[in-house]
Amino acid sequence: MTRCLSRSIAAAMLWAAISSTANAGTLTDTVEEWGLLGSWAVDCAARPDRDKGALLTYEIRKDGRVMYRRDFGEARDENEVVSATVNAEGLLNVMVYFPSLHQTREFGLRLSRDGSLRAIYNRSERGEYTIRDGKYVATGAPTPAQRRCD
């Protein structure tokens, strides 16, 4: 019984390792093919600022993890992208774990023909939206287009 249980645990651990490697490849392929990698801002010439616009960077680390860095000028953070999928309309659905917030957030991004990027939605794991239908929930203002800065 113990030997059988040990084999089951070993098999589960092996499957988890293979699955995480496969998922990492799929995640990196998705963000690369969609065109997300690099730095984005509303105004690339402006200094990053919480109120006027952050510099947002997506990169693949040497260890295969996809990271999302936010530079607000006076504050910066780095968070891991845990999944990314593209829906039938071409919207990139991204899930990012924010350790400082103790939560995972999901957001949808749309790449326009002119190469700009817009946030279409942003919600917490509880389903609380800060952006819905391309507009900030608090103000109703449309989300601004972001340009690639690199």
Image: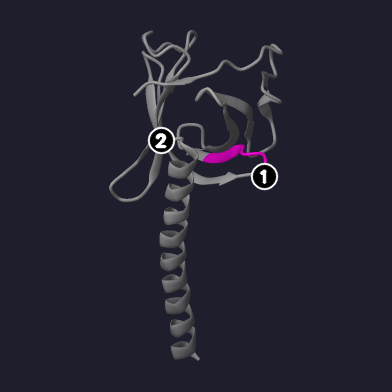
Q: Position of residue 88 (x, y in %)?
A: 67, 44
Tag 1 residue: 88
Q: Nearer the viewer, residue 102 or 29?
A: 29
Extent of the magenta region: 88-95
Q: Position of residue 1 (x, y in %)?
A: 50, 91
Residue at screen point 58% across, 31% down: 109
Residue at screen point 42% across, 73% down: 14
Question: Mark 1: which amino acid?
Answer: Ala
Q: Nearer the viewer, residue 150 or 12?
A: 150
Task: From the image, state whether disc 2 or disc 1 is nearer to you.
Answer: 1
Quarter holding residue 112: top right
Residue 37 disc label: 2
The number of numbered discs placed on residues in the rendered structure image is 2
Residue at screen point 40% across, 43% down: 66
The local crowd at label 1, few if under 14, some if 14 to 19, many if 20 or more residues have their Cα within 10 Å, is few
Question: Mark 2: which amino acid?
Answer: Leu
Question: For residue 62: magenta?
Answer: no
Q: Regarding mark 2 in the picture, which secondary structure is present there?
A: loop
Colour mode? one colour
Q: Rounded to the nearest whole Å, what is the CA distance between mark 2 and mark 1?
A: 21 Å
Q: Regarding mark 1 in the picture, which secondary structure is present there?
A: loop
Residue 34 disc label: none
Q: Nearer the viewer, residue 33 or 71?
A: 33
Residue at screen point 59% across, 30% down: 110
Evaluate if marks 2 and 1 touch, with contact meaning CB atoms under 8 Å apart. Answer: no
- Position of residue 88 relative to residue 120, above or below, is below
**Which circle's residue, 2 or 1, is located before the other in the chain?**
2
Question: For residue 92: magenta?
Answer: yes
Q: Position of residue 47 (x, y in %)?
A: 36, 9
Quarter holding residue 68: top left
The C terminus, quarter of image: top left
The local crowd at label 2, few if under 14, some if 14 to 19, many if 20 or more residues have their Cα within 10 Å, is some
